[in-house]
Amino acid sequence: MKPGVADGMAFSTKPRKKRRPLEADEAVEGILDSSRTILARAITVIESRAPAHRPLAAEILRRCLPESGRSVRVGITGVPGAGKSTFIERFGLQLCEAGHRVAVLAVDPTSAVSGGSVLGDKTRMEDLSRHSSAFIRPSPAGGTLGGVAAKTRETMLLCEAAGYDVILVETVGVGQSEVAVRTMVDFFLLLQIAGAGDELQGIKKGVIEMADAIVVNKADGDNKRRAEVARGEYSRVLHYLHPHTPGWTPKAMACSALDGTGVDAVWKTIGDFRSQLEEAGTWSSRRQEQNVKWFHTLLKDAVLARFFESAAADGLREIEGEVAAGKVSVTEAVDRLLWP
């Protein structure tokens, strides 16, 4: 068989040209010019764990920060099978057609065994991914709390600097750990379905308490009546729970991501939520509180990483062996490591 030919099909044997590294000026200018290609490359730099990328990532963030913060940030979670991707595509398309620019940060589960992830959200949202006013960024969860990628917050800032005025963060839907996304968005939406049985609907009470709205999806066809019944049940449940957002009464709604029925009402509810918080003067203060929590989270992560990298961690393996063998208690081992 000739080089470059396989089963009658020709292919190039030339080595692919290596892409030139992104520079700070190019990245910032491209982001502010709303280049989706440059934005994607800049996010890759932000997400990188390579020490060599840290200075560039910090410079890009520093220069984009003044242009960020002008979007509505919406977190979307739900039970498996609730149709999150279908809902987000319909919701995003309707927002784009209404003149908005929508960024979807879809976080895929990461395998605890292989570390790999599916990253299939662009496949599931084909129409939205092709829209000129939309940007979809699938990212591996990486085992972080709530299925939220470690750099999701920074990614939001870059998307806002690029002019996206609606940021949708889709999480993997794993229950109590969704608290992570709650701390980085303005509005938290819980997607549910009717008639799926207790096992499928077994989302923890804590997640319901964090929701600013519960939307029963798939309210179409023969399921329409059941969805309306479920909406009424969730409405009664919300009535007895303490709202997560002071001054706001969480809503229970029904919609069909398949035919679009009720999707506009979801956006109207988010608009009412923002107006109410702005009138009360709490919209900006919540963002400020989130920034402080973000700072504390990153500080803890950095301190922990620095500890394991430091000389203090040199005796870690030895102490681990003693703990495993039962020669020393866990409490004593920690004391020895932190206060030798």
Image (cartoon, rainbow, N blue to C red):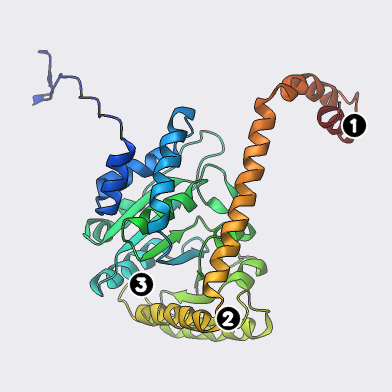
What residue is shown at x 55% (from left), y 79% (from top)? Answer: 281
Secondary element type, mark 1? helix
Sooner in the amino-acid sequence: mark 3 or mark 2:
2
The amino acid type of the residue labelled 3 equals Ala
Q: Amino acid at mark 2?
A: Tyr
Q: Under tag 3, what secondary structure?
A: loop
**41 or 178: which is nearer to us?**
41
The answer, for residue 223, to whether it is visible in the render is no
> On the image, numbered disc 1 is attached to which residue?
332
Tell me, for residue 257, which label it has, or none.
3
Q: Quadrant of the N terminus?
A: top left
Report if the CB atoms under discs 3 and 2 are less than 8 Å apart.
no
Q: Which residue is mark 2?
A: 234
Residue 18, given in percent of the width and then of the height, sits at: 24, 25
* Badge nearest the viewer, 3 or 1: 1
Residue 9 visible to an observer of this rendering: yes
Q: Residue at x 30, y 35 (%)?
A: 22
Dot 2 alpha-carbon crowd within 10 angstroms: few under 14, some 14 to 19, many 20 or more: many
Tell me if mark 3 has few (under 14), some (14-19) or many (20+) residues whose alpha carbon lies within 10 angstroms of its own.
Answer: many
Mark 2, secondary structure of its residue: helix
Name which of mark 2 and mark 1 comes first in the sequence: 2
Sequence-earlier tag: 3 or 1: 3
The amino acid pointed to by label 1 is Glu
Horizontal relation, residue 149 to residue 159: left or right: right
Instruction: Report, in whole angstroms, how far the alpha carbon at label 3 lies from the one at label 1.
Output: 55 Å
Residue 214 picture location, percent across and down: 52, 76
Q: Is residue 169 above or below residue 54?
A: below
Above or below 181: residue 47: above
Name the residue located 28 percent from the left edge and 44 percent from the top edge: 38
Q: Quadrant of residue 307?
A: top right
